[in-house]
């Protein structure tokens, strides 16, 4: 696999050294001084980062529109409030990534690994991640997980919650659930992510 396109970024080899220092999978770091990639607020629009190893990087609030992250390792990456519209995330590893408040509108997520990713308040891509705006909580759905407001659980767990469990989530949760639960069930059945 050719990775030369990644080494033009001055933060890439120090991040690989930082990963190596912690015994985590990494690419060659050529003896660089270890430093975790802190790309908060960075404009990376149109960057070619396919196959990049960015696990544990800080990309909070980054502009990642149109970035090629095909087959990238983004596990444990902080993507809180990042702009990922039109980004290629096919086959990307987003397991345990913090995607809260991220905008994934029109992103390509085919075969992306979203296991244990934080999805609260995400704007989905309408395919693998769907977002439904309700008052007061947005609903985020994948084929396996549903986040309502700040509560995220598997769809099966949500289906098993009784009134007492739902009422314990918020003062208004039970009333909200009585209105929205049947609608959500229909959406899940008709339009599974």
Image (cartoon, grey):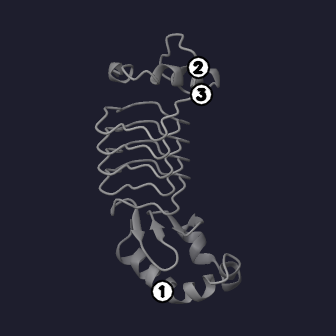
Q: Residue at x 40, y 47 (%)?
A: 112
Mark 2 to mark 1: distance in Å?
A: 52 Å
Question: Foreground mark, 2 or 1?
Answer: 2
Q: Residue at x 51, y 56 (%)?
A: 100
Residue of label 3: 24
Q: Badge 2, how many Cα within 10 Å: few under 14, some, many 20+?
A: some
Reply above or below: 131 against 92: below
Q: Secondary structure at mark 1?
A: helix
Of callouts 2 and 1, which one flags the residue occurring earlier in the amino acid sequence?
2
- Between 110 and 80, which is closer to the camera in this rendering? 80
Q: Is 184 situated left or right of 153 in this image?
A: left
Identify the mark at residue 34; answer none if there is no mark.
2
- Between 142 and 12, which is closer to the camera in this rendering? 12
Q: Secondary structure at mark 2?
A: loop
Residue 67 spot, x, y in % from top left: 32, 40
Reply above or below: 11 against 159: above
- Between 24 and 101, which is closer to the camera in this rendering? 101
Of callouts 2 and 3, which one flags the residue occurring earlier in the amino acid sequence?
3
Of callouts 3 and 1, which one flags the residue occurring earlier in the amino acid sequence?
3
Mark 3 to mark 1: distance in Å?
A: 44 Å
Residue 192 spot, x, y in % from top left: 38, 69
Q: Is 38 situated left or right of 1 in this image?
A: right
* Marks 2 and 3 close (CB-CB < 8 Å): no
Which quadrant of the figure has residue 89? top left
Reply above or below: 56 against 179: above
Residue of label 1: 182
Residue 193 spot, x, y in % from top left: 39, 65
Question: Foreground mark, 2 or 3?
Answer: 2
Mark 2 to mark 3: distance in Å?
A: 13 Å
Q: Secondary structure at mark 3?
A: loop
- Between 89 and 78, which is closer to the camera in this rendering? 78
């Amino acid at each position: 696999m050719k990775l030369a396109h990644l080494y033009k970024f001055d933060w890439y080899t120090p991040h690989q050294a930082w990963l190596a220092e912690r015994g985590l999978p990494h690419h060659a770091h050529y003896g660089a001084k270890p430093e975790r990639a802190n790309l908060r607020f960075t404009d990376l629009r149109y960057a070619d980062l396919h196959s990049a190893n960015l696990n544990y990087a800080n990309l909070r609030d980054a502009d990642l529109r149109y970035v090629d992250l095909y087959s990238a390792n983004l596990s444990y990456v902080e993507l809180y409030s990042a702009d990922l519209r039109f980004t290629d995330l096919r086959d990307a590893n987003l397991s345990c990534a913090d995607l809260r408040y991220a905008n994934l509108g029109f992103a390509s997520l085919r075969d992306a690994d979203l296991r244990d990713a934080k999805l609260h308040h995400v704007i989905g891509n309408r395919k693998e991640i769907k977002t439904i705006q309700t008052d007061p909580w947005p609903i985020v759905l994948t084929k396996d997980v549903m986040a309502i407001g700040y509560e995220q659980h598997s769809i099966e767990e949500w289906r098993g919650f009784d009134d007492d469990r739902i009422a314990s989530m918020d003062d208004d949760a039970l009333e909200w659930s009585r209105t929205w639960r049947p609608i959500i069930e229909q959406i899940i059945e008709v339009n599974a992510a």
